[in-house]
Image (tube, rainbow, N blue to C red):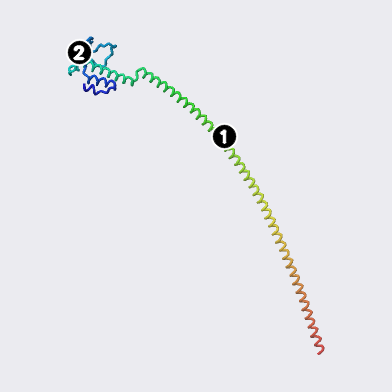
Amino acid sequence: MTSLLSQPTTSRAGALLAMSIARPLPLLSTRLPYPLSNRSFSTSKPRKISHFDTYLFVEKLEKNGMTRKQAEGVMSVLAEVVEESIKGMESGLVSKAEQEKQRYTEKVDFARLKSELQLHEKNDLSLMKAENDRLMTDVEKLKQRLREEVTRTQAGVRLDLNLEKGRIRDESSQQELKIKEVDTRIESEIAGLRTQIEQAKFSILQYLVGVATGSGALLLAYMRMMVSFHVSFGDLE
């Protein structure tokens, strides 16, 4: 009895059980107004399916000192408690059909999700492929433009180098011509100086010859005059 009372019950079932135990029922004769069937009790209400052996439970209560009426009351209350407990547990459980329905719904949802993911993956792959193709096209265009720019730059550099080489050659030719002109002018100046030096030498030589000739003539004239003077002075003596 103590083990039965220690089980969890609902508030209504617990109250019924406590009232049946606390309040003694009137004693009746052992002969019941209705026949008892094997392991079940007949009442005016429709017969319910018991979840435990009611007949054996009543016998155990009678052996523990209860009367038949008290034992039947406790059994009825306990049956209601058990029935309500089972109904409460069944309300929280899911039936097999609902479980199968839930499983089928989950399978359908999973299949739909899988198809959507595959579709998104295909779309993403298509978008990525298109974007990759567009990027590759842009890269090829950039490469082509870069090659054209490099070729144009190389051609411009070659043209500038050729023009610079031609200008340097022209300047070199002009410098060579100027150098040749300077050399020619220097040579002509040197030749003129040589001619002038030769003329100066000849003039100096002519001057020296004239001076020497004049000096000799003067010396001869002086000697003649001295000789004539001596001769004249000798004659006077």
Query: Along the horizontal axis of the image, is 127 left or right of 197?
Result: left
Identity of the residue drawn at 68% across and 54% down: 178
**Res 101 label:** none
Q: CA distance from mark 2 to mark 1?
A: 110 Å
Query: Along the horizontal axis of the image, is 102 left or right of 45?
Result: right
**Relative to residue 14, is residue 155 depicted above or below?**
below
Quadrant showing the C terminus:
bottom right
Question: What secondary structure is marked by label 2?
Answer: loop
Judged by depth in the image, the label closer to the viewer, 2 or 1, is 2
| x then y, percent, for residue 213 | 77, 74
Quadrant for residue 115, please give it.
top left
| x then y, percent, for residue 34 | 23, 9
**Relative to residue 17, is residue 174 depicted above or below?**
below
Quadrant showing the N terminus:
top left
- How many residues crowd mark 2 within 10 Å: few (<14), some (14–19), many (20+)? few
Asked if labels 1 and 2 touch by Cβ distance under 8 angstroms, the answer is no
2 or 1: tag closer to the N-terminus: 2
Question: What secondary structure is marked by label 1?
Answer: helix
Type of amino acid under label 1: Lys
Query: Along the horizontal axis of the image, is 173 left or right of 213?
Result: left
According to the picture, the residue beneath numbered tag 2 turns out to be 28
Type of amino acid under label 2: Leu
Front in this rendered view, residue 51 or 27: 27
Quadrant for residue 224, please give it.
bottom right
- How many residues crowd mark 1 within 10 Å: few (<14), some (14–19), many (20+)? few
**Res 141 label:** 1
| x then y, percent, for residue 28 | 20, 13
| x then y, percent, for residue 225 | 80, 82
**Relative to residue 19, is residue 164 depicted above or below?**
below
> Is residue 181 something that shows in the picture?
yes
Identity of the residue drawn at 44% across and 22% down: 112
